[in-house]
Image: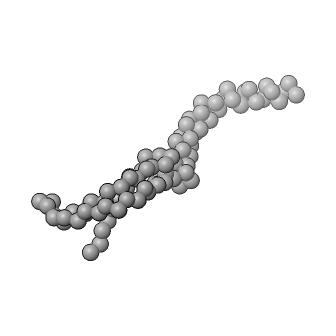
Amino acid sequence: MADEKQNLLTFFKENGILLLAIYGVVQVWIIALWKKYIKKGKIRIFETGSLEIGYSAFGPTIAVNGTLRALRYYVTLVIRVRS
């Protein structure tokens, strides 16, 4: 039993820095994958009845008045309109 503990301590003395470096690199990737694929942010839409369609110096505009609430994380919303 004491010999096993001594072998374990020797292993960590020799390879501890390498193990910590590998853990640091892997941890960053695991967190990134978790946030991107496993626990994605969601949007809750609170509908309203107002919609404005107009034309300005920027070209045709559509204003959708309502409330969007991001759940869990910040969410980037991209709206594409096809004519």
Q: As drawn, is 11 to the left or to the right of 20?
A: right
Q: Position of residue 67 (x, y in %)?
A: 38, 52
| 17 relative position to 72: left or right | right
Up the image or down, 21 lies above or below 47; here it is: above
Please name whichever residue, 40 or 31, is drawn nearer the observer in this view of the structure: 40
* Residue occupying the point 71% across, 31% down: 11
Name the residue rendered at 29%, 63% in the picture: 51
Q: Residue at x 74, y 26 (%)?
A: 9
Q: Is residue 27 visible?
A: yes
Looking at the picture, tell me which residue is in the foreground, 21 or 13.
Answer: 21
Q: Position of residue 54 (x, y in %)?
A: 19, 64
Screen quadrant of the N terminus? top right
**Residue 20: x %, y % from top left:** 59, 33
In the rendered structure, the answer to whether residue 59 lies left or right of residue 35 reads left
Name above or below for residue 64 compared with residue 73.
Answer: below
Asked which quadrant contains residue 7, the reply is top right
Instruction: Tell me which residue sits at (76%, 30%) in the image.
Output: 8
Residue found at the far front of this picture: 49
Q: Nearer the viewer, residue 49 or 22?
A: 49
Look at the image and tell me whether residue 29 can be seen. no
Residue 79 in the image, given as x and y percentages of width and height: 33, 62
In the picture shown, does residue 29 fall above or below 80? above
Toward the right, the furthest residue is 1
